[in-house]
Amino acid sequence: MTRQILSQEKIIQTSIELIEEGDVLSFSAIARKLGTKSQALYSYFNNQTELRYAVVGWAVTQVGDQLRKQLFGLSGQAGIVAFATEFRKLALTHLKLTQFVLSMPRTKKYSEVTKAFGEIRLLLNQMIDGVYPKSQQLLVSRCVRDIMVGDIVNVGTGWFTDDSLSATDSFHELLVMNLKMLKDL
């Protein structure tokens, strides 16, 4: 039997594979997939909670990197719409991983997670800045995030069944309508 070389990155990637395959994330499942013993994982993560937040940090960092690439040069309302649309697309493409991330309670205990979420929030806030007055920016940010997450949850769980309006079109229309309404306040 060949010796398995482990690393935090390999364990995180295996965890993501398990999540996206719909399997339960546990040290024993990860160890089985890696061909090692679950005790070997404790050298890299103190417990499963620490591993779970490492997965969240990795996933959110990847989303932030992709958003920065896709949105380069955009600003204003067009940037906000592009941000929300790209975020939604990425989340629905990796639905099980997204559901996993959304299921984890927010905490400031893990700095890499806090940093990753902060960078995404900063990117959205940069799109909002200059379009809306400072007094409205938090409300606009929360509105955009509510629409994105709500749509991801509804589409991901199959709640949108009426084919007379596609989920993508309704997402876009709701987003634009809310942004206009907030601008007119």
Image: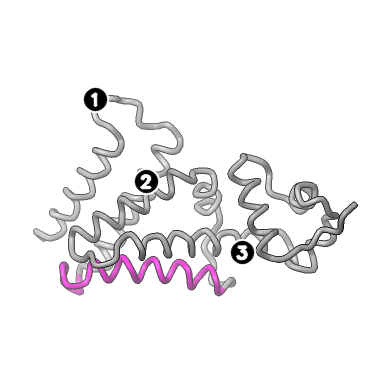
Q: Quadrant of residue 36?
A: bottom right
Spot occupied by residue 12 in the image (x, y as percentages of width and height): 65, 59
Q: Upstream in the sequence, badge 3 or badge 2? A: 3
- SS class, disc 1: loop
Between the C-alphas of marks 1 and 2, the distance is 20 Å
Report the amino acid beneath label 3.
Ala
The quarter of the rendered structure image containing the C terminus is: bottom left
Q: Upstream in the sequence, badge 1 or badge 2? A: 2
Residue drawn at 24 percent across, 59 percent down = 80
User: Residue 164, relative to residue 15: is it above or below?
Assistant: above
Spot occupied by residue 184 in the image (x, y as percentages of width and height): 9, 59
Spot occupied by residue 102 in the image (x, y as percentages of width and height): 50, 52
Q: Which residue is mark 3?
A: 54
Spot occupied by residue 34 in the image (x, y as percentages of width and height): 77, 52
Q: State which region is magenta.
A: 111-135
Q: On residue 150, which mark appears?
A: 2
Q: On residue 164, which mark appears?
A: 1
